[in-house]
Image (cartoon, rainbow, N blue to C red):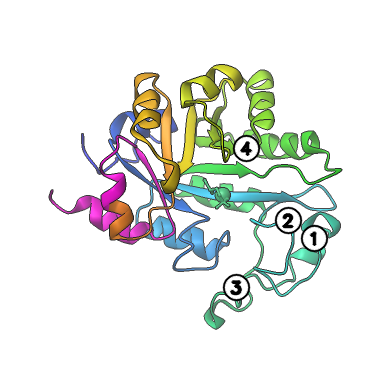
Amino acid sequence: MSEIHSKDSYTLRSMIADLHRFIVAHRGSSGTAPENTMSSLQDAIEVGAHMVEVDVQLTKDDQIVLMHDPGLARTTNGKGIVRSMSYTDLKTLDAGSWFNSKYIGEHIPLLSEALQFLNDHQTCVNIEIKPPQKDDDHITRLLAIVETVISHNMQNVTLFSSFHHESLHYIKKHYSNLYTAGIHLPGDKRLPSEIASEIGCNGFVCSLREITHAKAQDASKHDILMGVYTINDEHDFHKIMKYNVPALVTNFPKKIQEYLQQPT
Ligand code: G3P
Ligand code: MG
């Protein structure tokens, strides 16, 4: 199968059918730009990533923003937690200079802004739904995420993933046409098909450390989309090439795309 995907038929289903392997830019191209920002999305698009993974959090005023951690300290110049701040306050924070001073002033994007950008560039998206914090109303957050995707009419190009399988089960129950992928939980001995039969997910994701032939073969046999994170260097790339895994999740989409395109 071709490694180059035509964006003429821009859906998750057609991408999976067209490509034996494809590149998922993890938190955008987070090795070259600050994670989960418009710059990391822009870099991912420029180097031809087939899909972009983003993490999302809910603000105090129920807006969905791109952010990996519940707290602001690691990736912004703010303090405290996302859930305790309104988007009006969050958008004044600097989410770029922690990574490199050339990204000073980079803002925290709304999910809506990111989706619009990815749709304009006909690029599929993987939205990772983080496990709820204590006392979190995770259904409110889940509905806000799902409804944002629906409002952009991007149901056919979006994959929802999570370590919190209950959230994915909820999505399938209430929105059966949406695509979901369970992320492997530490210590979980179940095969992808066993998880899929419990929560109805379409895909399964695990780390490079957790990949086994049993998992990859089971996913392939049961037509479950499989992804592995994070494939960041040549050593990782050679390891994953030994497995039948289509989705290569990477912080360095340009580098991994180049490895993929090298003749074997
Ligand atoms: O898609 C898998 C990966 O994103 C899960 O881990 O912590 O990078 O969000 P994390
Ligand atoms: Mg993630």
Q: Position of residue 5 (x, y in %)?
A: 29, 41
7 with respect to 147 (left or right) = left
Q: Nearer the viewer, residue 110 or 60?
A: 60
Q: Secondary structure at mark 1?
A: loop
Q: Amino acid at mark 3?
A: Gly
Q: Please tell me whether mark 4 sits on a helix, a strand or a loop.
A: helix
Q: Are marks 2 and 1 in contact (CB under 8 Å)?
A: yes
Foreground pick, 36 / 45:
36
Q: Is residue 245 left or right of residue 170?
A: left
Q: Which residue is mark 1?
A: 81
174 is higher (above) or lower (below) than 168:
above
Q: Quadrant of residue 78?
A: bottom right
For marks 3 and 2, give the CA distance.
17 Å
Instruction: Give the class, few, some or many, for how many residues have Cα within 10 Å of label 4's Cα (few <14, many ≥20).
Output: many
Front: mark 3 or 2: 2
Residues marked 1 and 3 touching at CB (< 8 Å): no
Reading the image, the residue beneath label 2 is 70
Label 2 secondary element: loop
Distance from the alpha carbon under mark 2 to that under mark 1: 6 Å
Of badges 3 and 4, the one in the foreground is: 3
Q: Residue 263 in the image: x percent, y percent?
A: 13, 51
| CA distance for labels 3 and 4 | 25 Å
Q: Nearer the viewer, mark 4 or mark 2?
A: 2
Magenta-colored span: 238-264
Q: Which residue is mark 4?
A: 149
Residue 27 visible somewhere in the drawing:
yes
Rounded to the nearest angstrom, the CA distance separating label 4 from label 2 is 21 Å
- At 53% from the left and 37% from the top, the residue drawn is 184
